[in-house]
Amino acid sequence: MTRLVCAAMALAVVVSFARAEEPKKKIDAGTQAPSFKFKDATGKEVDLAELTAKGPVLLRLTCGCSGCDKELAYFQAIHEAYKDAGLTSVAVFREPDDKMAKYAKEKKINMLYAVDPKGEAWKVFDTKAMPVNFLIDKGGKILHVASGCDPSGLLAKKVGDKAAKVINAPAVDVKAKVDSSKK
């Protein structure tokens, strides 16, 4: 009987430990976007939930490296193509404030953006990838996640096509648009 009681107690300890160590739910397509607030370039606090209450959001966690720099034009083209149809584009840069002020002016960043040098957004969204793009539907459900750097614009075209479907707008070939402007 003592062995049975000891075995039951050991099992209870293992089960309770396993429950305490359950992994966080992976943030991916089909899940609800996490609670996330950030300060925009003017210092105003912006709540992702408030943005997604109004309509779909394309959230891009990025940096100013050469690859992300080359991709920026494609994501700005997505913003321009779909902002009037209701898509809000947000770029969160993992760069220091002083560098971003100069970079934003130089690149003529025309979308909502924030600076996150400590990488809090990456922690909230449980990702180490950079860049990573989250297409979030009105109401906060993540519809699509696209990770990795693609300076060719193909990844941005795919994200832009998905955004067009979400807002029920004609797709704009952002890759072709940006590439033709480079010539």
Image (cartoon, rainbow, N blue to C red):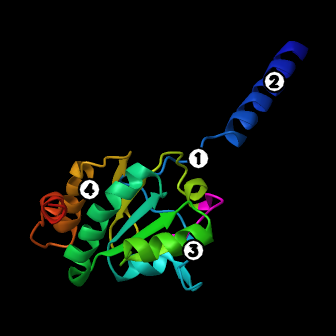
Q: Earlier in the sequence, mark 3 or mark 1?
A: 1
Q: Earlier in the sequence, mark 4 or mark 3?
A: 3
Q: What is the CA distance from the residue labelled 4 to the residue labelled 2? A: 52 Å
Quadrant of the rendered image containing residue 58: bottom left
Q: Nearer the viewer, mark 4 or mark 2?
A: 4
Name which residue lies at 51% across and 73% down: 102
Q: What is the CA distance from the residue labelled 4 to the residue labelled 3? A: 23 Å
In the rendered image, which residue does mark 2 sit on? 10
Name which residue lies at 16% across and 66% down: 181
Tell me whether circle 4 and circle 2 mark residues in contact (CB < 8 Å).
no
Q: Which mark is residue 24?
A: 1
* Position above or below: 70 against 181: above
Q: Nearer the viewer, mark 2 or mark 1?
A: 1
Circle 3: residue type: Phe
In the rendered image, which residue does mark 4 sit on? 156
Tell me whether circle 3 and circle 2 mark residues in contact (CB < 8 Å).
no
Quadrant of the rendered image containing residue 142: bottom left
Q: Give SS at disc 3.
A: strand
Question: Outermost residue toward the front?
Answer: 183
